[in-house]
Image: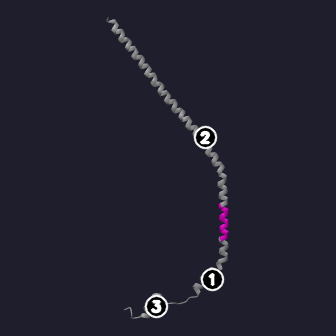
Amino acid sequence: MASHPSQGIQTLLEAEKEAAKIVQQARQYRVQRLKDARSEATREIEEYRRVKDDEFKAFEASHAGNISNVQVAVEKETDIKLQSISQVFEVRKDQVLRKLLDRVVLIKPELHRNLKKGALGGSEEQ
């Protein structure tokens, strides 16, 4: 009878070892799957980044011509406005110069408005 219980214990120990092997294999399988998933995600991210970079470069190249066209248009508009301002200056400079000289040369002496009140009333305010 003594051998029968020890054989049962031996069977239980072997079953426990087999279960530990199965658990260890499951852990290793899970770790390997996580590593594979990470590397796959990294590959997908790099591929997506490369595709988006290519799309951006294509977009940038297609719109680079538009930027130079806009710049040329702005420069042309600026030149037109400068010409217009120069023409107005040439037309009006004589008038402005004449008005300035009239103000400087033709002086009309007048008493200051505050002085008029005080000088004419004299002793009324005191």
- The residue carrying mark 3 is 116
**Quarter of image, res 115:** bottom left
Q: Residue type at mark 1? A: Arg
Q: Residue at x 40, y 17 (%)?
A: 17
In the image shown, does 88 or 100 lie closer to the viewer? 88
Residue 106 position within the rendered picture, expressed as x and y whole percent measured from the top left: 58, 88
- The residue carrying mark 2 is 51
**Quarter of image, res 2:** top left
Q: Of marks 2 and 3, which one's residue comes earlier in the chain? A: 2
Q: Residue type at mark 2? A: Val
Q: Which circle, 1 or 2, is nearer the viewer?
A: 2
Q: Relative to residue 6, is residue 23 depicted above or below?
A: below
Q: Which residues are magenta?
A: 74-84
Q: Relative to residue 57, is residue 21 depicted above or below?
A: above
Q: Residue type at mark 3? A: Lys
Image quarter where the N terminus lies is top left
Q: CA distance from mark 2 to mark 3?
A: 85 Å
Image quarter where the C terminus lies is bottom left
Q: Main secondary structure of the magenta part?
A: helix
Q: CA distance from mark 3 to mark 1?
A: 31 Å
